[in-house]
């Protein structure tokens, strides 16, 4: 009988190590989605959404944790819980949560991106860039991944590396002002003034009151020796900054009003909750989220005519307010106004998110 030839000792050790590694590493769990959710999970998600709409983030977190426990492989629920933790001011808890999910599902780019952005918010920039780069490699044409990879690299001072990612983001979203704004700022820091001016001019065309784009475009014009254009652009920047500050003042006032109203409503005093909202009416009567909140308070008290009026005013000023549209659909249907209900439903579909006020330069 012929003797079997053994492999060299080193190869045998490598084979043993590889075999041990494959056996010790569990297979990635299968993902689940909306179609796999049980009635119990759907109920918990509905309760979480309602709590979130009312501003009760603690209760929303509680329901989301229950839903994720019952459906632990659902990335959308994982993302909702992480977002809620961030909104509550608990980024470290969000980081731990994302790490636990990624331990089971390391190849989900949306969760990987959320994890990277959470690390960015915690100031862990090197780790953030690495995680976002993994997400971008899995989905090269994903706008948030490309854009945020460019931003992360720029925050690290790696401007040359950031440029191609921001350029690709601008190509992927030609109507969005953020990518050319970020690209223009990076090019300005690289002293590529002509390219920077072109990118920032595009950003301002897309959003004329774009505060960071106007500020940096003014700086760029000054370095190019275009003094008149620099002066005019910085004057526009000053006016846009003033408008932005006014918006933020209204937003702070709205959160204060809603907080007082919610406290009274949760205490079983919805009439007093409405009074707390109405106390801010003079200052917030033209602020769409306030009008939507006022409509909800009227619905809670059965004052349907007042609710309809408030919701109609809200969506007239901001068509993206999904809750106002949804409430109008129900209220119109209850009163037999089917045509109005249909238009409200169509408005909810057409509505797009309002542009957020730009960050300061």
Image: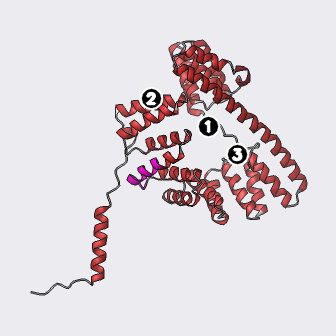
CA gap, disc 1 and disc 2 = 23 Å
CA gap, disc 2 and disc 3 = 33 Å
Magenta residue span: 96-107
Residue that mark 3 sits on? 359
CA gap, disc 1 and disc 3 = 17 Å
Nearer the observer, 119 or 358: 119
Instruction: Return the x and y of residue 323 as percentages of the image width and height.
Output: 56, 27
Q: Quadrant of the N terminus?
A: bottom left
Query: Could you say which quadrant of the image residue 4 lies in?
Result: bottom left
- The reply to whether residue 341 is visible in this rendering is no
Q: Earlier in the sequence, mark 1 or mark 3?
A: 1
- Residue that appears at 67% across and 25% down: 316
**Majority secondary structure in the magenta region:** helix
Residue that mark 2 sits on? 47
Q: Earlier in the sequence, mark 1 or mark 2?
A: 2
What mark, if any, has residue 353 been given in the picture? 1
Q: Does 255 sit above or below residue 265?
A: below
- The reply to whether residue 218 is visible in this rendering is yes
Q: Element under label 1?
A: loop
Q: What is the crowding at mark 3: few (fewer than 14 residues within 10 Å), some, or many (at least 20)?
A: few
């Amino acid at each position: 009988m012929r003797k079997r030839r053994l492999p060299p000792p080193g190869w045998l050790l490598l084979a043993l190590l590889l075999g041990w590694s494959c056996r010790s590493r569990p297979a990635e769990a299968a993902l689940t989605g909306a179609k796999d959710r049980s009635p119990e999970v759907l109920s918990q998600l509905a309760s979480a959404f309602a709590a979130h709409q009312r501003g009760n983030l603690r209760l929303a977190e509680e329901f989301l944790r229950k839903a994720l426990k019952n459906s632990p492989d659902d990335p959308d629920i994982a993302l909702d819980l992480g977002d809620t933790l961030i909104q509550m001011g608990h980024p470290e808890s969000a980081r731990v949560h994302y790490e636990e999910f990624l331990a089971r599902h390391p190849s989900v780019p949306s969760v990987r991106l959320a994890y990277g952005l959470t690390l960015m918010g915690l100031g862990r920039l090197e780790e953030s860039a690495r995680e976002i780069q993994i997400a971008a490699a899995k989905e090269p044409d994903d706008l948030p991944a490309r854009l945020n990879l460019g931003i992360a690299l720029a925050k690290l001072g790696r401007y040359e590396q950031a440029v191609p990612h921001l350029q690709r983001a601008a190509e992927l979203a030609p109507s969005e002002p953020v990518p050319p704004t970020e690209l223009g700022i990076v090019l300005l820091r690289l002293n590529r003034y002509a390219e920077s001016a072109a990118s920032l001019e595009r950003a301002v065309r897309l959003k004329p009151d774009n505060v960071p784009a106007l500020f940096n475009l003014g700086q760029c014009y000054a370095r190019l020796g275009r003094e008149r254009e620099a002066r005019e652009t910085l004057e526009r920047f000053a006016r846009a900054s003033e408008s932005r500050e006014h918006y933020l003042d209204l937003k702070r006032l709205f959160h204060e009003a809603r907080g007082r109203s919610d406290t009274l409503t949760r205490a079983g005093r919805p009439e007093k909750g409405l009074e707390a909202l109405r106390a801010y009416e003079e200052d917030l009567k033209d602020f769409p989220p306030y009008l939507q909140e006022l409509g909800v308070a009227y619905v809670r008290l059965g004052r349907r005519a007042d609710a309809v009026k408030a919701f109609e005013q809200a969506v007239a000023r901001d068509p993206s307010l999904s809750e106002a549209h949804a409430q109008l659909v129900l209220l119109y249907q209850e009163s037999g106004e089917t045509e109005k209900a249909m238009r409200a439903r169509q408005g909810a579909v057409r509505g797009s998110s309002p542009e957020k006020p730009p960050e300061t330069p």
